[in-house]
Amino acid sequence: MTNLAYLSKERIRELEKELTDLKNNGRKHMAERIAEARSHGDLSENAEYDAAKEEQGLLELKISKLEELLSRARVIDTSNMPKDQAHILSTLKVKNLNNAKIFTYTLVSPEEADLEKGKISITSPVGQALMGVKPGQVVQAKVPAGVIKFEILDLG
């Protein structure tokens, strides 16, 4: 059985766009690079050709992985989820009580996690600690560096 990947509509669209671009432009560009390298003569000693073929293999691997992920993708429907409690795709404003800094996090599936954009996986220690919380609660997350305490300031 394959594991379903729950993604937002926006993320599925991004992945579909990336896949289309790789299939069309990426493959075309790669074919041009291989043809150019091939025109340089003896393939047995042509490092440029070898590099282009290796890059082509990596491109095809990336295309394959995107196709596989999209085949497992399901859109997350949050319409039936409670509005007063954190769940996947909830955005929370939290205060780290260890250093008094305030952060805004969106809880997402592991496939969408991107800490630089404030998207944290529901399977990460912090994501797990924030699932199901309500404004005003204080929770703890065990992370490799120790324990972080968060106060939930707002849920949107």
Image (cartoon, grey):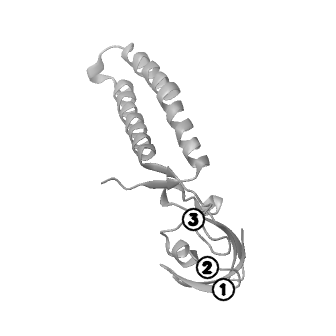
Q: How far apart are labels 2 and 1 at the CA level?
A: 7 Å
Q: Is residue 77 left or right of residue 97?
A: left
Q: Position of residue 123 (x, y in %)?
A: 47, 69
- In the picture, measured across the screen, residue 65 lies left or right of residue 148, that is left
Give whichever of discs 3 and 2 has the lower sequence position.
Answer: 3
Disc 1: CA contacts within 10 A as few (<14), some (14-19) or many (>=20): few
Which residue is the site of mark 3? Answer: 88
Label 3 to label 1: alpha-carbon separation? 18 Å
Query: Crowding near pointer 2: few (<14 within 10 Å), some, many (20+)?
Result: some
Secondary structure category for the residue under label 3:
loop
**Label 1 secondary element:** loop
Q: Position of residue 124 (x, y in %)?
A: 49, 70
Q: Is residue 96 above or below residue 9?
A: below
Location of residue 92 by image quarter: bottom right
Q: Which residue is mark 2?
A: 133
Residue located at (42% from left, 43% from top): 71
Amino acid bearing label 1: Gln
Q: Which mark is residue 105?
A: none
* Residue placed most toward the observer, 93 or 76: 76
Question: Residue 39 versus residue 112: which sits nearer the camera?
Answer: 112
Three-letter amino acid code at the position of disc 3? Ile
Estimate the x, y position of residue 110 in percent, counting from the top left.
49, 60
Asked which secondary structure carries label 2, the reply is loop
Circles 2 and 1, Cβ within 8 Å, touching? The answer is yes
Q: Is residue 110 above or below residue 136?
A: above
Q: Quadrant of the N terminus?
A: bottom left
Label 1, on which residue?
A: 137
